[in-house]
Image (cartoon, coloured by chain):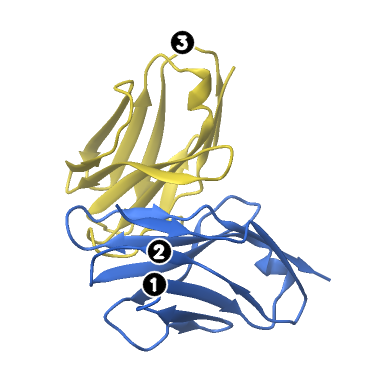
Chain colours: A blue, B yellow
């Protein structure tokens, strides 16, 4: 069974600095998708970034970028120039492509951006 | 315009009652989902429908029954509510089973 591990329950970063959130996963599949979602205090789940495993190039979305290491089964999220609005829970998710397509979520990392 | 909406946003009820949560998406997506987020923020899928057909049914008590009247709606009915059902329930939708999922605002259910 696939598992997703986020080993940092809580992190903090100073405004304007860079922070990296880690995520590792376990799967025997070769094709799959990985996601980072953000859940601010408003509770809304917001897609941050998506990575297809067959793409070697790391996905980027403005200040957010990933370091995808397929062999190591690692999918970390880097947030550059952190802003107060980045304060949220961040969830890593895995979706395989054999059998049913369902998200497997990690336990989340609570990120606090300090002024 | 809200893409995925849920009603109600908050629901407080007594043990043993029956309640429903409604979900609607206006994105034209074919696939819809229900997730449960527990008090430790852990998110787990409960059900998934594709074109009104049930495709994922995780190990969920029979007291939970999803209903999809059409592609744009997926409702969740819960019978005989228990204290352990207290959680935030999220609806989500995606264009197809392999596409990115977009979440609703969540419904916080509190069972007293």
| Element under disc 1 | loop
Q: Chain of mark 3?
A: B
Task: From the image, tell me which residue sits under label 2.
Answer: A25
Q: Above or below — where is A83 with respect to A41?
A: below
- Residue B100: image x %, image y %? 34, 64
Q: Residue furthest right?
A: A115
Nearer to us: label 3 or label 1 = 1
- Residue B106: image x %, image y %? 50, 43
- Residue A26: image x %, image y %? 36, 62
Q: Residues within 10 Å of mark 3 (few under 14, many from 20)?
A: some
Task: From the image, tell me which residue sits under label 1.
Answer: A73
Q: Residues within 10 Å of mark 2 (few under 14, many from 20)?
A: many
Q: Chain of mark 2?
A: A
| Element under disc 3 | loop
Residue drawn 23% across the image and 72% down it: A30
Residue drawn 45% across the image and 13% down it: B17
Q: Above or below — where is B106 with respect to B17?
A: below
């Amino acid at each position: 069974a696939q598992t997703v591990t986020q080993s940092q329950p809580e992190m903090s970063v100073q405004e304007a600095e860079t922070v990296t959130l880690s995520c590792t996963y376990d799967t025997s599949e070769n094709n799959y998708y990985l996601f980072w979602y953000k859940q601010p205090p408003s509770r809304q789940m917001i897609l941050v970034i998506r990575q297809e495993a067959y793409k070697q190039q790391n996905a980027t979305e403005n200040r957010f970028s990933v370091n995808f290491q397929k062999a190591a089964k690692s999918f970390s999220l880097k947030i550059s120039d952190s802003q107060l609005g980045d304060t949220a829970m961040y969830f890593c998710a895995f979706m395989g492509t054999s059998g049913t397509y369902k998200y497997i979520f990690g336990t989340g990392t609570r990120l606090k951006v300090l002024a | 315009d809200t893409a995925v909406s849920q009603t109600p946003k908050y629901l407080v009820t007594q043990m043993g009652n029956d309640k429903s949560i409604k979900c609607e998406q206006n994105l034209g997506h074919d696939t819809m989902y229900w997730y449960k987020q527990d008090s430790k923020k852990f998110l787990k899928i409960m059900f998934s429908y594709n074109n009104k057909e049930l495709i994922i049914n995780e190990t969920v008590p029979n007291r939970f029954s999803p209903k999809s009247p059409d592609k744009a709606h997926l409702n969740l009915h819960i019978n005989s509510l228990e204290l352990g059902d207290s959680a935030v329930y999220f609806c989500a939708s995606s264009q197809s089973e392999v596409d990115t999922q977009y979440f609703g605002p969540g419904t916080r259910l509190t069972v007293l």
